[in-house]
Image (tube, rainbow, N blue to C red):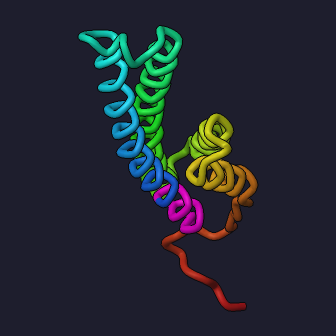
């Protein structure tokens, strides 16, 4: 079955996940460096302990975002080629894409994953009565 639309949506969504991965790494590095600088050295003159805690919370959040976006990108690319090859459990990949997109629904990649998952689940399979090697018989 031709699943070109789902393939393209998932590839674009996985590509946006990779871009989000690089942005999340940048945020993790910036917040991590600031958090480390606030906890060590003479930076107690400039920062309160509550500010240090906030920077550590942002650092941990950015690290979780890094992990989640790389998993999303890897699963997106693997799932896209599984859908393209029309494996027998393609409906399962559709459900997984809906769940993955639901977890990141406020991002572009999440919306694309949800749309691709819905398209995968709702596409009708057409069954033919003739065999592949017989060809079409004209009556």
Residue 95 in view of the camera:
yes
Q: Position of residue 25 (x, y in %)?
A: 35, 37
Number of callouts in the render? 0
Is residue 133 positioned above or below 78 on the image? below
* Quadrant of the drawing holding the N terminus: bottom right
Q: Position of residue 16 (x, y in %)?
A: 47, 54
Observer-nearest residue: 37 or 104?
37
The overriding secondary structure of the stretch rendered in magenta is helix
Image check: 71 left or right of 3?
Answer: left
Image check: 3 left or right of 16?
Answer: right
Which residue is painted at 61% across and 55% down in the image? 112
Image check: 6 left or right of 29?
Answer: right
Observer-nearest residue: 91 or 41?
41
Name, please, the residue furthest toward the left.
41
Q: For residue 34, what is the image quadrant?
A: top left
Q: Is residue 6 magenta?
A: yes
Q: For residue 66, what is the image quadrant?
A: top left
Residue 1 in view of the camera:
no
Which residue is painted at 67% across and 90% down in the image? 138
Which residue is painted at 40% across and 45% down in the image? 23
Q: Position of residue 119 (x, y in %)?
A: 69, 57
* Quadrant of the drawing holding the C terminus: bottom right
Which residue is painted at 39% across and 19% down in the image? 46
Q: Position of residue 94 (x, y in %)?
A: 63, 45
Q: What range of the chain is rendered magenta?
A: 1-11
Is residue 96 positioned above or below 126 on the image? above
Observer-nearest residue: 52 or 130?
52
Observer-nearest residue: 4 or 101?
101
């Amino acid at each position: 079955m031709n699943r070109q639309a789902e393939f393209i949506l998932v590839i674009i969504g996985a590509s946006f996940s990779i871009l989000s991965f690089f942005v999340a790494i940048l945020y993790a590095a910036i917040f991590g460096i600031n958090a480390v600088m606030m906890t060590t050295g003479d930076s107690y003159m400039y920062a309160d302990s509550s500010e240090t805690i906030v920077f550590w919370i942002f650092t941990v959040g950015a690290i979780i975002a890094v992990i989640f976006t790389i998993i999303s990108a890897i699963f997106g690319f693997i799932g896209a080629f599984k859908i393209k090859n029309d494996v027998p459990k393609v409906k399962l990949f559709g459900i997984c894409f809906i769940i993955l997109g639901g977890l990141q629904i406020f991002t572009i990649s999440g919306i694309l994953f949800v749309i691709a998952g819905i398209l995968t689940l709702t596409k009708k399979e057409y069954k033919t009565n003739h065999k592949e090697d017989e060809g079409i018989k004209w009556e």
